[in-house]
Image: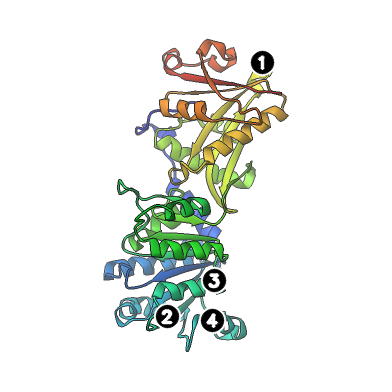
């Protein structure tokens, strides 16, 4: 696995059409599904933000590249105060022919029957808006909680001007599973603890995934792999599986992103095809590819060795075990192939340290540093001698 330091990569080999491919992938993933947006007094509802929100909804509802595409369905839960209703009026006016606004008469418990018993009034609409009226003694977030527990949305996007959850350094934390969220809430003086506790209850109650971000971050959050806000999932672990034909376009976009960020060596199309042939992906939920890696062994049959290549985890999922699970899966695959050892090469000291820290398999085996000359000769055929001298090489002997 050849990595480069985290600097920009020049040359056409590191250039990708990532924006289009990522955007197209997520538009397809959202097709025919409800995306639920929560807007309130805590949201940034300046005219420019609302207009950006309207444009984003337009793209979700109708694919600009294919007018016949079904598009997504949108559910808006908004705080029906005068200021919020006034700010969102241009959105409702623009989607007047495609939107249905429901004003509940009593409590959130009445909403599901309205949806289920009178579908003729709204099923032809692409935007369903629920105006949540102020209720004395009840916070808007608690009303959303009740709706969420009853409707059990698959995707809930909570829009607040503060954006995602930040650490002490002010950096937005990209991913929380249930365990990590619980750990955060056990900490003292957690900012926005009330909101986080409600998100925790929503996840426990059946909401599949929640995003917390600003309206200005929505485009990057919804249409890129890296995202921009904080993503919450009730699933504690990711699932690793071999990638197939339908996964290749997404996998290539992620590999090219790793090249652009400087963590992966730029590869030609021929080399990339070799990576894909032995590639595995780590998935959060069913459809969110969080990381990728590949196993090369054909060139090293005589030594019964395998090389770990293109191990890369998206930034928002780093630190939650995705890389370790990918590597553990590769070790299992290597044993099934009857390999005696695995190795990896990198220029990046931090990447080498990751390999050295991992404890893998029932024997808790670990990688260790080796000289480049210890590795199979086929690894270095046609290799740039200067680059070879810069490589940090690690190796793992596979136990029985």
Q: Which residue is mark 2?
A: 132
**Badge 4, how many Cα within 10 Å: few under 14, some, many 20+?**
some
Pair 1/2: label in front? 2
Nearer the N terminus, badge 3 or badge 2? 2
Q: Which type of secondary structure does the marked residue at label 1 adopt?
A: loop
Residue 328 position, x and y percent, is: 61, 34
**Badge 2, how many Cα within 10 Å: few under 14, some, many 20+?**
many
Residue 183 position, x and y percent, is: 46, 51
Specify the quadrant of the image occupied by residue 397: top right
Relative to 314, is 196 above or below? below
Relative to 275, is 397 above or below? above
Q: Which residue is mark 1?
A: 303
Residue 346 position, x and y percent, is: 46, 24
Q: Which mark is residue 381?
A: none
Q: CA distance from mark 2 to mark 4?
A: 12 Å
Pair 3/2: label in front? 3
Please tell me which residue is depicted at 31% across the width and 82% down the height of the picture: 82
Q: Which residue is mark 4?
A: 109
Residue 284 position, x and y percent, is: 55, 50
Nearer the N terminus, badge 2 or badge 4? 4
Specify the quadrant of the image occupied by residue 39: bottom left
Please tell me which residue is depicted at 52% across the width and 54% down the height of the picture: 178
Pair 1/3: label in front? 3
Q: Which mark is residue 149?
A: 3
Nearer the N terminus, badge 1 or badge 3? 3
**Badge 1, how many Cα within 10 Å: few under 14, some, many 20+?**
some
Nearer the N terminus, badge 1 or badge 2? 2
Q: CA distance from mark 1 to mark 3?
A: 56 Å
Please tell me which residue is depicted at 46% across the width and 27% down the height of the picture: 353
Pair 4/1: label in front? 4
């Amino acid at each position: 696995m050849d990595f480069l330091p985290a600097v920009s990569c020049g040359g056409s080999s590191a250039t990708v059409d990532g924006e289009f491919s990522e955007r197209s992938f997520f538009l397809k993933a959202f097709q025919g599904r409800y995306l639920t947006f929560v807007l309130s007094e805590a949201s940034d509802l300046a005219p420019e933000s609302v207009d950006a929100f309207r444009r984003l909804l337009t793209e979700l509802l109708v694919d600009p590249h294919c007018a016949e595409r079904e598009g997504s369905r949108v559910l808006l839960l908004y705080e029906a105060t005068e200021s919020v209703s006034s700010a969102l009026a241009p959105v409702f006016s623009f989607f007047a022919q495609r939107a249905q606004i429901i004003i509940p008469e009593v409590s959130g418990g009445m909403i599901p029957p309205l949806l289920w018993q009178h579908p003729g009034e709204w099923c032809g609409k692409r935007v369903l808006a629920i105006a949540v009226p102020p209720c004395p003694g009840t916070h808007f977030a608690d009303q959303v909680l009740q709706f969420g527990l009853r409707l059990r949305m698959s995707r809930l996007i909570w829009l607040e001007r503060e954006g995602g959850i930040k650490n002490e350094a002010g950096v937005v934390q990209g991913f929380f599973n249930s365990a990590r969220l619980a750990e955060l809430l056990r900490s003292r003086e957690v900012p926005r603890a009330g909101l986080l506790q409600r998100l925790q209850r929503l996840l426990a109650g059946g909401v599949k995934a929640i995003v917390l971000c600003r309206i200005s971050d929505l485009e990057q959050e919804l249409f890129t792999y890296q995202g921009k806000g904080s993503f919450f999932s009730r699933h504690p672990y990711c699932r690793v599986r071999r990638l197939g034909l339908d996964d290749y376009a997404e996998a290539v976009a992620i590999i090219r992103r790793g090249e652009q960020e400087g963590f992966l060596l730029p590869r030609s199309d021929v080399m990339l095809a070799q990576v894909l042939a032995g590639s595995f992906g780590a998935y959060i939920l069913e459809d969110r590819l969080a990381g990728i890696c590949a196993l090369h062994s054909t060139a090293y049959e005589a030594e019964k060795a395998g090389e770990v290549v293109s191990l890369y985890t998206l930034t928002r999922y780093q630190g939650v075990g995705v890389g370790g699970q990918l590597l553990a899966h590769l070790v299992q695959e290597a044993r099934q192939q009857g390999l005696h050892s695995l190795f990896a090469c990198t220029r990046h000291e931090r990447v080498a340290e990751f390999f050295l820290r991992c404890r893998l398999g029932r024997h808790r085996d670990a990688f260790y540093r080796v000289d480049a000359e210890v590795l199979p000769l086929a690894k270095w055929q046609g290799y740039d001698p200067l680059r070879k001298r810069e490589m940090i090489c690690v190796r793992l002997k596979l136990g029985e």
